[in-house]
């Protein structure tokens, strides 16, 4: 799936930056899901000792950044640091398109499963 960002994502260093607008999304793999889950976990110290804490919000952003195949010249997945520099409108646009892509993939799987019955 391809679409254009409204505000763009800066690419380059200092005065040599260029805004990138064209986004290409891809389907997530099982490996992406595992990596996103692992990246969203951290060890915290509690009164009962160390515990593993997972952040659902961070998991969502980790999945979203892995859905991005590229933004212009920038190959995905986007580093979380770069994802944070997006304008809010562009972040919402990417999330919306990723949701549409996911829904279409799930619909296709359901249709194929129904045809096999």
Image (cartoon, grey):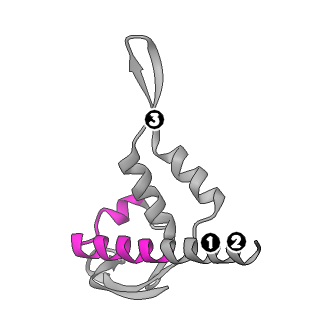
Residue 84 seen from this side: yes
Q: Evaluate if marks 2 and 1 touch, with contact meaning CB atoms under 8 Å apart.
A: yes
What residue lies at 49% left-to-right and 85% top-to-bottom? 1
Numbered range of the magenta stretch: 80-101
- Location of the C terminus by quadrant is bottom right
Q: Which residue occupies the extreme right position in the image? A: 116
- Residue 94 is marked as none
Q: Which residue is mark 2?
A: 113
Residue 105: name its quadrant.
Answer: bottom right
Q: Position of residue 72 (x, y in %)?
A: 43, 85
Judging depth in this view, the residue of 113 and 52 nearest the camera is 113
Q: Which residue is mark 1?
A: 110
Q: Position of residue 99 (x, y in %)?
A: 42, 71
**Dominant secondary structure, magenta:** helix
Q: Is residue 28 above or below residue 101?
A: above
| Left or right of residue 59, residue 110 in this image | right
Residue 85 lies in the magenta stretch = yes
Q: Which residue is mark 3?
A: 42
Depth check, mark 3 against mark 2: the one in front is 2
Judging depth in this view, the residue of 113 and 28 nearest the camera is 113
Q: Position of residue 65 (x, y in %)?
A: 45, 65
């Amino acid at each position: 799936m391809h679409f254009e960002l409204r505000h763009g994502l800066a690419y380059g260093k200092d005065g040599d930056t260029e805004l990138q607008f064209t986004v290409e999304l891809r389907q997530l793999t099982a490996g992406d899901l595992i990596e996103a889950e692992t990246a969203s976990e951290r060890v915290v110290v509690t009164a009962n000792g160390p515990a593993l804490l997972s952040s659902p919000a961070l998991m969502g952003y980790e999945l979203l950044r892995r859905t991005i195949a590229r933004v212009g010249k920038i190959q995905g997945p986007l580093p979380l640091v770069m994802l944070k520099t997006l304008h809010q409108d562009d972040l919402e646009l990417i999330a919306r398109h990723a949701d549409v892509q996911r829904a279409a993939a799930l619909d296709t799987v359901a249709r194929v499963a129904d045809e096999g019955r």
